[in-house]
Amino acid sequence: MPQGAEWLIILAIVVLVFGAAKLPDLARGTGQALRIFKAETKGLRDDDDDKKKAPKSTGELNAVDDDIAEGEIVDERRENNA
């Protein structure tokens, strides 16, 4: 991990590459991107929690329970209808 002097060198290089006027825009864009990323990952985690808590539906076979691929179930239905 960089120490104090290394951070100053890194900051100087960033200022030279992007310019002092662009740094606030760069920081703002980075902050917005991080906020969006965090919101999306939280949404994915919430969706996973909802799926775990939801009761399993009864009736048709569930491909996950029977270790059958979804395509196989569709093919089987087509054969039954033919």
Image (cartoon, rainbow, N blue to C red):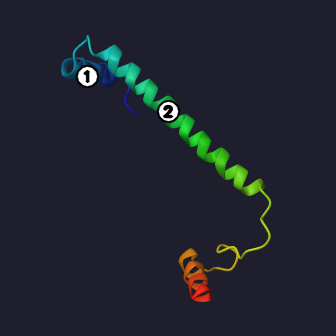
Circles 2, 1 touching at the beta carbon (< 8 Å): no
Cα distance in 3D space between marks 2 and 1: 24 Å
Residue 36 is labelled as: 2
Q: Identify which residue is drawn at 71% across, 50% down.
A: 49
- Image-based side of 68 in relation to 33, left or right: right
Earlier residue among tags 2 and 1:
1
Residue 67 in percent (x, y) is at 64, 79
Element carrying mark 2: helix
Residue 72 falls left or right of residue 23: right
Q: Amino acid at mark 1?
A: Val
| Circle 1 SS class | helix
Question: Which residue is pictured at 19% across the width and 18% down the height?
Answer: 16
Residue at 56% across / 82% down in the picture?
72
Q: Which residue is mark 1?
A: 14
Taking the spot 65% from the left edge, 48% from the top edge, the residue there is: 47
Point out residue 3 in the picture as x, y percentages from the top left corner. 38, 26
Single out the residue that lies furthest toward the front.
82
The quarter of the displayed image where residue 51 is located: bottom right
Query: How dense is the environment of label 1, judged by Cα within 10 Å: few (below 14), some, or many (20 and up)?
Result: few
